[in-house]
Image: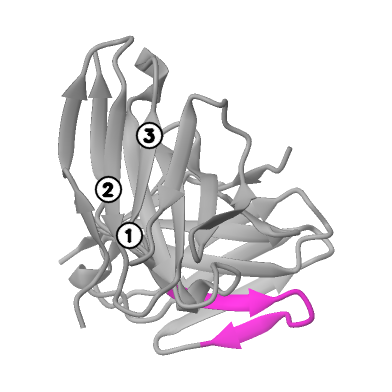
Amino acid sequence: KAGVTQTPRYLIKTRGQQVTLSCSPISGHRSVSWYQQTPGQGLQFLFEYFSETQRNKGNFPGRFSGRQFSNSRSEMNVSTLELGDSALYLCASSYRGGLAGYEQYFGPGTRLTVT
Amino acid sequence: GESVGLHLPTLSVQEGDNSIINCAYSNSASDYFIWYKQESGKGPQFIIDIRSNMDKRQGQRVTVLLNKTVKHLSLQIAATQPGDSAVYFCAEKSGNQFYFGTGTSLTVIP
């Protein structure tokens, strides 16, 4: 079974631009969660989508948004990029939702650098 | 907000020795805890979890200990191997959200 895939793996953007990241979950998984990982803050939860609906949301500004398609693939968008948005963005998929750690599978992440 | 921290940012151990990685959490209402391993260039990988109604759980070569009195979590790796070299971090669940520590980098010396 193929794992979680994320594209692109690396991205360089300029402050003020917007960016869209993509995540393809494991086949059959309906939940996709997004996280931001930085050295200083560790992993921080952005939001979770389940069957095309946002089910949970972390404490990030409205510049961070996401969506999920009928095939469970998910995208997250960051508008008006700031230098502090430079991070590794991880997505994780699970069948029923990310409340059990063993059920959640992470992708390799997209490394975003904002200059 | 939640605060999950690790006592040591780096840890070096000899191959074959046991490793102990520690984690402090701040929310006494957290009911579920996870340890993750993250290798360079990869996403986090689930290692072991424990619920708040337990104080110890064992897996293959790993043991997690939970001390709710002092809000402390530890991961013990027995007979550490070179393949164990990675960043390890803990997570706590409070409500419907997870809060993660920043990680401890474990280096295994052959």
Inspect the magenta stretch and tell me whether residue B52 lies in it.
Answer: yes
Q: Amino acid at mark 3?
A: Asn
Q: Which residue is mark 2?
A: A22
* Among the two numbered marks 1 and 2 on one chain, the one whose residue lies closer to the N terminus: 2
Secondary element at image label 3: strand
In this view, B22 is above or below B18: above
Please provide the residue range marked out in magenta.
B47-58
The reply to whether the C-beta atoms of the residues labelled 1 and 2 are less than 8 Å apart is yes
Q: Nearer the viewer, residue A114 or B40?
A: A114
The reply to whether the C-beta atoms of the residues labelled 3 and 2 are less than 8 Å apart is no
Same-subunit check for callouts 1 and 3 = yes
Work out how far the residue at label 1 is from the one at label 2, CA to CA, in angstroms: 7 Å
Q: Main secondary structure of the magenta part?
A: strand
Q: Residue furthest front?
A: A70
Inspect the magenta stretch and tell me whether residue A51 lies in it.
Answer: no
Chain designation of label 3: A
Chain designation of label 1: A
Q: Which residue is mark 1?
A: A73
Work out how far the residue at label 3 is from the one at label 2, CA to CA, in angstroms: 9 Å
Q: Is residue B95 left or right of residue A69?
A: right
Q: Residues within 10 Å of mark 2 (few under 14, many from 20)?
A: many
